[in-house]
Amino acid sequence: MASEIRDISLAPSGAMKIAWVKNHCDLLRTLEEEFSRTKPFEDIKIALSVHLEAKTAYLCKVLKAGGARMYVTGSNPLSTQDDVAAALVEDGLEVHAWHGCTPEEYDAHIRAVLSAGPQIIIDDGGDLVHMIHTQMPELLPEVIGGCEETTTGILRLEAMNREGSLKFPMVKVNNAQCKHFFDNRYGTGQSVWDGINRTTNLIVAGKTVVVAGYGWCGKGVSMRAKGLGAKVIVTEIDPVKAIEAVMDGFEVMPMKKAAALGDFFVTVTGCDKVIDEEDFYEMKDGAILCNAGHFDCEIDMAGLRRLAVSSAPLRNNITGYTLPNGRTLAVLGEGRLVNLACGDGHPAEIMDMSFAIQALSAKYLVEHQGSLSSMLIDVPEEVDREVAVKKLNFLGKEIDVLTPEQEAYLNSSTGA
């Protein structure tokens, strides 16, 4: 099947972006060199649905260097960068994606990459896995396994596994230490505020930021908001995480109370209707809403559109919704992922770690095909450790090593 992209003439711009990323991704460069020699994916078809920007594109090129036949699409209608998609096509990969696709076009792109009959699936949010199970089950026997990048995607996989409907092994890449400790906290923390700041051009210092959810992503968003000088309110459903937020110096309260106080709202939960119709009515005129979870339902966009007496663009990537009470709420990126719909996503050095784990996990699946007994697989400890050790080396840092006597002491039941 031929690629489906906006404009192949954009390829030089995309190639320049990918080259910049490559220069800042030491781990992936090392893997590209290794895979070029060893060809771990020789003649393996890989279907990939991840936010299609330069860092994802470089992961695709690393896998292709390992012999993979790549079939690529995005994982969000607003995060695909058309010049990057064009650059991949120019490099011989099959791509089905463009920025601003309709829901119908998005589904068609997912279907197109699955139609290749992949043996490995690399997913971000679970859309590939969901469609192949529910709409294209005839392709399931060919699949060796897959890798899931996100918390939301893993929640979907766990639900499928409980129901007994998951038909091939999936590696929980998001749960790797070298993924969620850094990608979710430092990557999300920085890239969310990159997206907000470049889109709004407003000051954060002195304002009140409401962060919904205090998982690793919420911790990062809150930490960066505090660093920018904001007063931060956290909303949570987990009492342990709520106590942690309090001890980290943040206010904690229900969204119903926080709604009237916030200047900026950032949802980071993976749940539905975290900000709902009642909350909209309580918000200040000019309150700014954005989402850093996976789907655009965390802010009840359907409810907001239903309530609004009018809507209009206020600035590129900002839509104002005027409520019956006369107040206007500003939504960034249509309620989709603000760091990608309004920015370039996580920093390259952070995604270097996450995507190295993706590549090594895919390699693990190929090497262990037919021998994996579980449908949901943790990233092997040796993969996590390999990534951490190499990253430290690239950072020019050294750590201590246990002596044989210390190892014996730690492994002794007497402690002596």
Image (cartoon, helix red, strand yellow):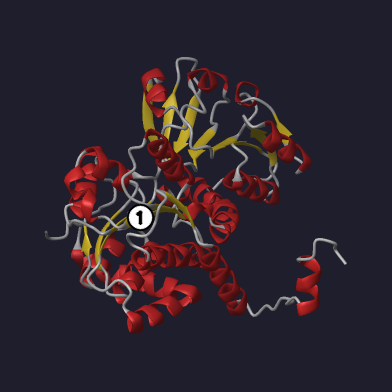
Task: Name the residue at the bottom extreme.
Answer: 37
Q: Return the x and y of residue 172 as percentages of the image width and height.
A: 46, 52
Disc 1 target residue: 146
Q: Seen from this angle, which residue lies furthest front?
A: 413
Write the residue at 51% across / 22% down.
280
Quadrant placement of the N terminus: bottom left
Looking at the image, the residue that sits furthest to the right is 416
Return the x and y of residue 99 as percentages of the image width and height: 29, 51
| Local secondary structure at mark 1 | strand
User: Residue 259, percent across and down?
Assistant: 60, 25
- Horizontal side of 86 relative to 202 (left or right) equals left
Residue at 56% x, 76% y: name it. Answer: 390
Work out which quarter of the rendered image holds the C terminus and state it.
Answer: bottom right
* Image quadrant in which you'd find residue 233: top right
- Is 352 on the left or on the right of 104, as rendered? right
The structure residue drawn at horizontal position 34% and vertical position 81%, both measured from the top left corner, is 38
Can residue 315 be spotted in the picture? no
Left or right for 250, reference 387 = right
Other residues around mark 1 within 10 Å, as few (<14) / some (14–19) / many (≥20): many
Q: Is residue 9 above or below residue 289?
A: below
Q: In this view of the protein, which residue sits in the foreground, 279 or 181?
A: 181
Where 152 sits versus 174, above or below? above
Furthest residue in direction top, as rendered: 324
Vertical order, 243 against 285 (above or below): below
Viewer-side residue, 8 vs 409: 409
* Of residues 37 and 316, the one drawn nearer to the viewer in this rendering: 37
Q: Name the residue rendered at 40%, 40% in the picture.
A: 161
Q: Amino acid at mark 1?
A: Gly
- Is residue 413 found left or right of 397 in the rendered image? right
